[in-house]
Each structure stands twice: as C-alpha cells, then as structure tokens.
Image: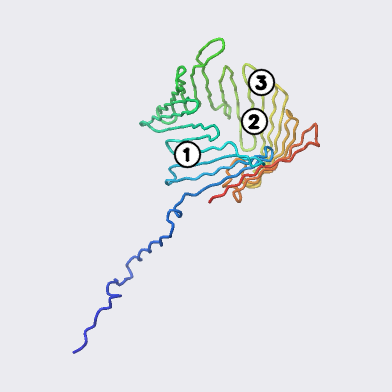
Amino acid sequence: MAESVQPNPSTSLVPTATAGDPPPPAPPPPTRAGGFLSRRPGIRVTTEFDSDSAVFFHKISCKFLDSLAKLKVSFQNNDKGEVFEPQLALTSKYLSLHYDLEERNALVKSSFDVGPGLEFRASHDVKAQQGEVTMVADLAGPAYKFELSSAVPSVGLPKATFKFPIGEVSLEEKEEEEVKKMLSINGIVKGQLLNGVCTAQYQDESLNLRYLYKDEQMAFIPSISLPSNALSMAFKRRFGPSDKLSYWYNFDSNYWSTVYKHTVGNDYKFKVGYDSEVRLGWASLWVGDEDGQAKTAPMKTKIQFMLQVPKDDIKSAALMFRVKKRWDI
C-alpha cells in the first residue's frame, strides 16, 4: 500500500497568493522601550541676546495633548548670571493662564462661543482683583460685529463698539478733571478716494486724516492732525524688486528721516538711514527675515548688526548686534 502524504503544518494554513490579490498589510512597527519618551511633545528653545542692554532672553515652550494646549516658560538674565522676570504661561483654545513668579500674580483669560454668532471673553487679574468681561455678537455676518465690554468690578457704563467693513466706532464713559463722567466717542473709517485709500481716525477730540496712494513703484502718504494742524508726509520709491527708498518729513517740526533698503532674497537685508531729530546716521545688516520668525531663517538663527554714528560726535560711534537662535528638541 502506498504511504499517505501528511500535510506540512508550516505551509498548510498559509493561503496561496494569486496575481489579483492585494499585497499583505505591513507588520506593525516594533514597540520600543520607553513608550512615554517616544511620545513626548516637541520642545522649542529660543534664546535672544541684545548687546545694547547686555541681556539674554530665553523662552522654552512645548505643545501637548495633541496640540490642544501649550506651555511656555520665559526668563531673562544679565552678564552676571542674575535671573529676573520669570514668566509661566499655559494657553489653550478656551483658557489661558499667565503667571508672574516675581510678582506672584496670575492673569487668567477665557474665550468661548455661547451660541451662534455670540462669543464671550473674560480676563481677571488675581492680585489686583480686577478684570473685564466682553460679549461679541455677529450682526448680518462676521463683517459686522457689536462688542459690549465692562470692567469688573463695574465702575460705570460698559464700552460699546460697532465694527463694520470700512471701520469701527466706539462709545465709552470717561472721567475728566472738570467733569466727573462724560461719554467719549472714538472711531476710524477707511474708504477709496482718487485711486487711493483715505483714513479718518477720531480719538480724544483729535482728528487724524491720512491718505495713501500706492502703485508698483511709488507710495505717497500725506497726513494731517486737527485741530493742531500738524502736517507730515511720507514718500516711498521702489527702484526694483530689491531696492527701496523711504523718506519722511514733518512740516511742523522740520524733522526728517530717510532709509534706503537693499534685500537679497528673503534672508538678507541691508539698511542705511539718517534721523535729523536725534542727528544720528545708522546702518544695519539683517541675516534672516527682519519681520519673520527664527524658524524660517537659515539655521534658525536671526542676526542683526547695527552701526550708529552721531552727527555731532563721530568718535562715539557704536556697533551693536542682536542674535536670536531657536532649537527644536
């Protein structure tokens, strides 16, 4: 009798793959020891030094709970190693806490929606026992808003602000020396006028009128304040994508200033200027975007060198620098 063939236990349970079958799923990654450390939030450390004040500024921050909250610790120290102004901040979408370790004081802020188109904001200074509550309502869409804010404890009528696409107007109660309490109106309005933008701002019984005309090569910005009749003018001329000249003149004081700027890409900027009010000429070199963050700069480092030369005493010229460095750990 022929011998019976026994199935191979190592292959009998494995299905045979065919040409139309999808590839088998990849095996899960091996579990590493110290799983908590492998899931720790990223830490960002930023250090900034200003040679003019000879002070270091440090900031350590990290996001946790899937970026739902952020913890930040900041402090300063001088060349003697003395630490001052330590601050602790915990922020989230609805609640933030800022704690001053030297003053032993906390500032608590909260913001959340209480209904469709209705937002509630509140802030409280623990040490001063003072705060503010604000209710913001959308009127006919987010472009129109009405804000009503009041100090806590209340010291008078709440401040009302109406915001619309071309400006805003606010009404609040103020205390004056001769009149104990009076209503004050402040506002700002913008609109198109003669191929430019005209802005009118009224605050503390003073009206400032500003006009801006701008095209691809030139910008002209005259402004006047009433009732003081203080008139000033700014002129900006672009000579190309990398070169720009700016000039400011105040007709009331005859002070003027000018700045010439040359850029190389987004990471290098050279500026030279003069200010007649302080009789000072200066030149500066930026490595890294001047208005950007350190994370976008080369090697996450921003550096500024500035040379200041007083017109009346050239020998007292000073060279200063600022350095800002970020580490992602």
Mark 3 → mark 2, Cα distance in angstroms: 17 Å
Left or right: 275, with 83 as reference point: right
- Residue matched to label 3: 230
Amino acid type shown at disc 2: Phe
Residue that sits furthest to the left in the current view: 1
Residue 224, compared with residue 86, is above or below; it is: above
Residue 310 position within the rendered picture, expressed as x and y whole percent measured from the top left = 77, 34
**Callout 2: few (<14), some (14-19), or many (20+) C-alpha neighbours within 10 Å?**
some
Is any part of residue 262 visible from this angle?
no
Label 1 sits on a secondary structure element that is: strand
- Residue matched to label 2: 220
Q: Residue at x 42, y 45 (%)?
A: 65
Mark 1 → mark 3, Cα distance in angstroms: 45 Å
Left or right: 48, with 146 as reference point: right
Amino acid type shown at disc 3: Ala
**Callout 3: few (<14), some (14-19), or many (20+) C-alpha neighbours within 10 Å?**
some
Left or right: 298, with 143 as reference point: right
Residue 328 position within the rendered picture, expressed as x and y whole percent measured from the top left = 54, 50
Mark 1 or mark 3: name the one nearer the start of the chain: 1
Amino acid type shown at disc 1: Leu
Label 3 sits on a secondary structure element that is: strand
Label 2 sits on a secondary structure element that is: strand
Instruction: Report which quarter residue 313 is drawn in.
Output: top right
- Residue matched to label 1: 90
Q: Tell me if label 1 and label 3 are in contact, CB under 8 Å.
A: no
Mark 3 or mark 2: name the one nearer the start of the chain: 2
Mark 1 or mark 2: name the one nearer the start of the chain: 1
Instruction: Report which quarter residue 153 is drawn in.
Output: top left
The residue nearer to you, when weighing 295 against 79, is 79
The residue nearer to you, when weighing 125 against 118, is 125
Mark 1 → mark 2, Cα distance in angstroms: 44 Å
